[in-house]
Image (spheres, grey):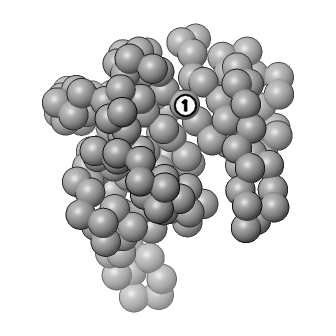
Amino acid sequence: MRIVFMGTPDFAAIHLKKLIDNKFNIIGVFSQPDKPKGRGKKVLPTPVKIIAQEHNIPVFQPRSVNLKSGFEELQNLKPDIIITVAYGKILKEKVINLPKYGCWNVHASLLPKYRVQLQYSGLLKMEKAKQVFPFLKLLKN
């Protein structure tokens, strides 16, 4: 199965690493553009980008995956499924509907219980953290 992963912070990097360690076929990673951080305002890569590069996975950092060039990069990968974890951007319907098996999101809390556009489809248990996170299928508005 061809998986595209979308995420940015440490929380997302942990999930990407787990997928890689379990030999899932990650064909590309989308992360927010690198930003200046710290006192020196040095531009640093996102935690997800670091993990992807360590494993020679192509990284894409468009300003928006919903717009022409970002969407075309995603389309060219021909994903079967998209997994998002703290990506930090709202995905448009054309992105959500692109992969054959849908677009799935791991949420950091049990908060989205009342959001109608999300549907609980299971729970992802993180062994080391001993926490449970909702695993949600994204649906159009």
Answer left or right for 73 relative to 15: left
The image shows residue 69 at horizontal and vertical percentages of 17, 33
The image shows residue 25 at horizontal and vertical percentages of 35, 45
Q: Residue at x 39, y 80 (%)?
A: 41
Residue 16 visible in the picture: no
The image shows residue 62 at horizontal and vertical percentages of 27, 45
| Residue 98 figure quarter | top left
Residue 134 against residue 85 in the figure, above or below = above
Answer left or right for 47 relative to 116: left
Residue 26 visible in the picture: yes
State the quadrant of the C terminus: top right
Question: Closer to the camera, 132 or 89?
Answer: 132
Q: Residue at x 80, y 49 (%)?
A: 132
Residue occupying the far top of the picture:
141
Q: Residue at x 63, y 41 (%)?
A: 106
Across the whole image, how many numbered discs are drawn on residues? 1
State the quadrant of the N terminus: top left
Which residue in the protein does label 1 denote? Answer: 104
* Amino acid found under the numbered disc labelled 1: Trp
Per the image, label 1 sits on a secondary structure element best described as strand
Question: Closer to the camera, 132 or 108?
Answer: 132
Question: Closer to the camera, 40 or 60?
Answer: 60
Q: Residues within 10 Å of mark 1 (few under 14, many from 20)?
A: many
Q: Residue at x 47, y 87 (%)?
A: 39
